[in-house]
Image: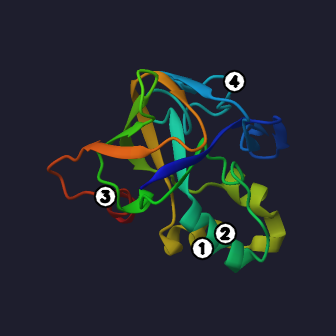
Amino acid sequence: MPELLAACVVRDLRPDRGNGVTAIDKVAVRSRAKIGPYGLRSDVQVDRKHHGGFDKAIYAYAQEDAEYWENELGRELPAGWFGENLRVSGIDVNAARIGEQWRIGTDEASVVLEVTMPRTPCGTFARWVGGEHERGWVKRFGAAGRLGAYLRVVKRGSVGAGDPIEVVHSPDTELTVLGMFRA
């Protein structure tokens, strides 16, 4: 069954030559994380034009995709490394349909999130990954098709590592996260 491996929030705001500052440095929280309309409590999106807001409140990334990049880059990539808020397992985030809804958790505090769009890799992400050491990162990341997805909050609540993820609504559209990126 798909499950949440970690909920991640900003560890440190970091200087970034493109935006001045970035909140891409995320780390897993040890307790349950409350989720409201703008995402996880205690998290920050510095560049709300491109990250955050209602339609990009949460960024989810799959452990299976992280393991692919660990092999490619030859290093461990812990939860939060991609700037994600949720590290998930057992669900193909890139094959998720736009408008698909996920319930995370099993009790009244569970959340419902809706897939809205793919992550589009950017210069800040490339600099975070390794700057000159990973030339062409934006194209490489996009070409691999392991993007992760942005989600909006349909029902507020809280999440924690080990919570099950269930697809509770699958729309009629065939448009997936990866399909939207490639279009």
Q: Secondary structure at mark 2?
A: helix
In this rendered view, identify the residue nearer to me: 41 or 164. Answer: 164
Report the Cα–Cα distance between label 2 and label 1: 5 Å
Residue carrying label 2: 137
Task: Residue under label 3, please give it.
Answer: 176
First in residue order: circle 4 vs circle 2: 4
Residue 156: % across, % down: 44, 21
Nearer-N-terminus badge (1/4): 4
Which mark, by number, is residue 120?
Answer: none
Q: Residue 159's quadrant in the figure? A: top right
Q: Position of residue 2 (x, y in %)?
A: 44, 54
Q: Quadrant of the N terminus?
A: bottom left
Q: Residue at x 14, y 50 (%)?
A: 172
Question: Which mark is first along the chain, 4 or 3?
Answer: 4
Q: Tell me the crowding category of disc 1: few under 14, some 14 to 19, or many 20 or more residues within 10 angstroms, Cα based.
A: few
Q: Amino acid at mark 3?
A: Thr
Circle 3: element type: loop
Mark 3 or 2, closer to the camera: 3
Q: Is residue 18 left or right of residue 174?
A: right
Q: Is residue 99 visible?
A: no
